[in-house]
Image (cartoon, rainbow, N blue to C red):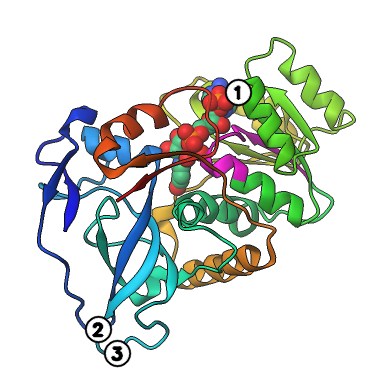
Amino acid sequence: MKAIRVHQFGGPEVLRIEEVADPVPGPGQVVVDVKAAGVNPVDTYIRAGTYARKPPLPYTPGSDGAGVVSLVGSEVRRFKPGDRVYVGGTSTGAYAEKALSEESQIHPLPERVSFAQGAGVHVPYATAYRALFQLGHARAGDIALVHGASGGVGIAGVQLARAAGLTVIGTAGSDRGRALVLEQGAHHAIDHNAGDFADQVQAATGGRGPNLILEMLANVNLTKDLQLVATHGRILVIGNRGTIEMNPRDAMAKEAIIQGVLLFNVTPDDSMRIHSALCAGLENGSLRPVVGQELALADAPRAHQAVMTPGAYGKIVLTP
Ligand code: NAP
């Protein structure tokens, strides 16, 4: 099969398409014919060698995908060849024609959801769900600020929060991104680069401030988030690309919680609950992943450049 291989950490050019052996499932494992693979920012950090978790070289990137089950190992109970599934983790990498996963890492993909959309489910939606509900304890009636709502995690956060009865404010840096954020269910869309950003958030919340902030770029925004958040509010740090100086008194004054989020930390039980909720949302149509760009597998280097470029618009997926 064809797969993207990384033989040394470095820039996007280290992503090369090669021929490798097809995976074979062991007990409890499943091989999926990948129809689309999701590109996440973390794939670029791992490729660059700057991420805390580094795979042994060479490796095939990608944790997210969607496709059709082609082979099942012994002891696999929930899936059979021909089933449409989305992939949330694989030991052989999703940027490939086939991926090997544990049975617990694959989930049914309803007919109404395309394979390209299915490739955008796992990391974005599981992270947004964990942040909102498992760690943020979001409740109907809360106000959520999704700070960075035009990308994969942000759109997931907007859809999940809206479906759960929250008032949703989403931010994006481009007109196109803000239009998308409104289309996906946000009540308000604000430019995170606007000089009067804080005033706009205060106006949208009637001066209360958001109860929850899903933060995609904490090193830029955390200090301002503490000024904005409601008393007893929660700031969920999802994305961060540097350091920031903050005054802890701002957290004291609000009795605010700054909560880190890391999808790698989910327990098997949390993961089962997350994907049960996501499968229900995909089935009932409240969760609709947005695919902004589809590229051929061989274009993985271009996809890695694009995912780090401002002006996010949903997901970038690769089609083998
Ligand atoms: P993405 O699709 O590239 O989207 C990035 C988002 O950040 C866009 O909405 C972008 O908006 C926004 N952004 C850019 N500048 C911003 C600013 N100054 N303030 C607020 N938002 C800003 O990436 P993603 O997949 O949604 O992931 C978002 C971040 O979360 C990444 O850093 C990723 O590594 C991280 N992440 C963490 C976890 C975890 O487990 N903690 C899981 C998944 C993702 P514009 O482009 O419109 O400006």
Going by the numbered disc 2, the residue's amino acid type is Gly
Q: Is mark 3 on a helix, strand or loop?
A: loop
The residue at the point 81 percent across, 54 percent down is 165
Q: Name the residue under label 1.
A: 223
Q: Considering only vertical position in the picture, is 149 above or below 11? A: below
- Report the label total: 3
Quadrant of image for the N terminus: bottom left
Judged by depth in the image, the label closer to the viewer, 3 or 1, is 3
Quadrant in which residue 41 is drawn: top left
**Image point 40% across, 82% down: which residue?**
79
Residues shaded magenta: 143-155
Q: Where is residue 309 in the image (x, y as percent from the top left)?
A: 43, 23
**Residue shown at the point (21%, 76%) measured from the top left:** 25
Q: Is mark 2 on a helix, strand or loop?
A: loop
Callout 3–callout 2 Cβ contact below 8 Å: yes
Q: Residue 305 carries which label?
A: none
Cα–Cα span, label 1 and label 2: 50 Å
Residue type, numbered disc 1: Thr
- Residue 228 located left or right of residue 237: right
Q: Distance between the residues labelled 3 and 1?
A: 51 Å
In three-dimensional space, the C-alpha distance between marks 3 and 2, rounded to whole angstroms, equals 6 Å
Give the labeled residue for mark 2.
73
Residue 75's label in the rendered image is 3
